[in-house]
Amino acid sequence: MQEILLRVRVSQYASCRQLVDALELGADDLLLTNRYIYDSYFAGFELPCQVIFQEKYGASEPSDDMAEAIYADIKGEPKRIVAVGGGTIIDLAKFFTLKQVSPILDLYDGKVLPEKGRELVIVPTTCGTGSEVTNVAVLALNSRHTKKGLAVDAFYADEAILVPELLKTLPWHGFAASSIDALVHAVESALSPKASETTKLFGYKAMEKILGGYMQIREHGQEARFPLHGDFLLASTYAGIAFGNAGCAAVHALSYPLGAAYHVAHGESNYAMFTGVMNAYMERKRDGEIAVLNAFLADMLGTETHRVYEELENLLNVILPKKALHEYGVTKGDLKDFAHSVAINQKRLTDNNFVPLTEADYYEIYKKLY
């Protein structure tokens, strides 16, 4: 059994000045980012590279339509793609490194072999995606009314660079949703049947950093996050290494229909599903890795194992108040459609479930969270 595969060089710089000096950006580079990030951190450097602002093409999460539109506007043949942003930027940039990008649906359908044609440098500006060290990119496939991941070796970055300074302008909701996403990555990867002792080291260390940070925020307020940005960035990358090897599972799978249909931020849609899936697991199996996980969480939270998810939700609600599905506009009629979509479209994820779950089980989870 493979213990761990690490394909991405990870670097860290204290400031954007150091980042720019290290990258030596030139005319053959494409910088994909957001306007507010560029204006806040890079405008004063007079960068000589091509720059594209993602939000010009839509404010929602990444989609095949958005990727096609951006790709059509790329000038020339850049040799290196530098992605500075959150999950949307990173997932889009992975597609732009391929030799053949369009039509994107052909990549999903296996009609085109994904081959890498450009270098990729990823600089995350949230503390949750973990995508900087994985070979996974997720897009909403608008014509198919679903959201789906693609995992291919060509999507691995050549380098991931962590710059804590970039989190200073991250709005609170972005911090909350992305860091909860990293927590879910860590938990799901620990419970995955593909997990190894080595991947669990990264996953549990990520949980420790994230929950420890949340408890400081609960005690001292939202401003307490700023000195902890480096820890949250590392936790996100650790969780990315863990799920990049062991995979995510039902929490992510069930979150995708919600995100695709109602444009709920990825981390928030994961949180909406998180404890529902964990309770479904425990109804079916309470020993094995979930017992190890529950003991670890209970120790961190200072509670008993039978109350661990109640106390965890109390802590997470300080960071991001949880909503029922109907509060996002979800209708009862959506629930069966969502469950069917998960069963049909998300097998890449559900193969990693801690215990097997059926379409009927997904429907029951949705009903309880409604």
Image (cartoon, helix red, strand yellow):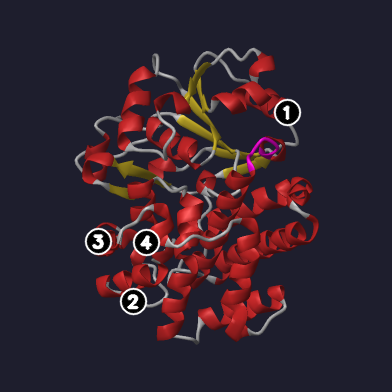
Going by the image, does 136 lie left or right of 320? left
Residue 333 disc label: 3
Q: Does the magenta stretch mainly form a helix, a strand or a loop?
A: loop
Q: Which label lies toward us, 1 or 4?
A: 4
Task: Give the image quarter of residue 164.
Answer: top right
Q: Which mark is residue 356?
A: 2
Question: Residue 18: which numbered mark, if any?
Answer: 1
Q: Are marks 1 and 4 in contact (CB under 8 Å)?
A: no
Which of pointers 1 and 3 indicates the residue nearer the eye? Answer: 3
Gap between marks 1 and 4 measured at Cα:
40 Å
Examine the image and state in which quarter residue 330 appears: bottom left
- Rounded to the nearest angstrom, the CA distance separating label 4 from label 2 is 14 Å
Tell me the quarter of the image containing the N terminus. Answer: bottom left
Which residue type does callout 2 highlight? Pro
Horizontal side of residue 346 vs 118, given as left or right: left
Q: Nearer the viewer, residue 165 or 198?
A: 165
Distance in Å between CA atoms under marks 2 and 3: 25 Å
Position of 145 relative to 298 (above/below)? above
| 3D distance between C-alphas at marks 1 and 2 | 47 Å
Task: Give the foreground label among 4 and 2.
Answer: 4
Look at the image and give the residue range highlighted in magenta.
167-171
Tag 2's secondary structure? loop
Q: Which mark is residue 254?
A: 4
**Earlier along the polypeptide chain: callout 1 or callout 2?**
1
Mark 3 or mark 4: name the one nearer the start of the chain: 4
The mark nearer the N terminus, 1 or 3, is 1
